[in-house]
Image (spheres, rainbow, N blue to C red):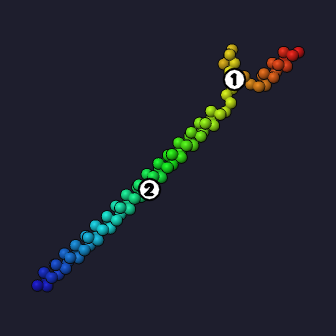
Amino acid sequence: MMTRRKGAEDMNANKEIQDEMVGVLTAISIVSKRLANRLLDLDEEQGNEDETMDKEESAKKEELPKEDKSANNNEAVKPEAINQNEKGASK
């Protein structure tokens, strides 16, 4: 009779341990899912910030003055060269 009682107690103990493990694993799963969602949200926010920064940088690049191109040799005309040409022409 002791053996049956001890066997039943062991089974109850195993059942309790299994139930506790199920609870712990379920909690881990829930927390993992929440963390994954938060990481996705942060990634999306950073992606939006990166897009905004890219747009701002593009706008700044468009605002930069573009150099005039020489019709003859397709090289940029430097202001020093223009000034020297004007001085030479006035002599």
The residue positioned 54% from the left and 46% from the top of the image is: 49
Instruction: Tell me where residue 76 appears, x and y as whole percent.
Output: 69, 23
Q: Quadrant of residue 82?
A: top right
For label 1, the residue is 68
Q: Is residue 16 above or below residue 64?
A: below
The residue positioned 68% from the left and 21% from the top of the image is: 69
Asked which secondary structure carries label 1, the reply is loop
| Residue kind at label 2, given as amino acid type | Arg
Instruction: Tell me where residue 56 appears, x and y as whole percent.
Output: 59, 40
For label 2, the residue is 38
Residue 67 in the figure: left or right of residue 13: right
Instruction: Tell me where residue 17 appears, x and y as whole percent.
Output: 26, 73
Residue 5 in the figure: left or right of residue 58: left
The image's mark for residue 2 is none
Q: Is residue 15 above or below residue 47?
A: below
Q: Nearer the viewer, residue 14 or 37?
A: 37
Mark 2, Cα crowd under 10 Å, few <14 / some 14-19 / many 20+, is: few
Q: Quadrant of the C terminus?
A: top right
Q: Is residue 31 above or below residue 50?
A: below
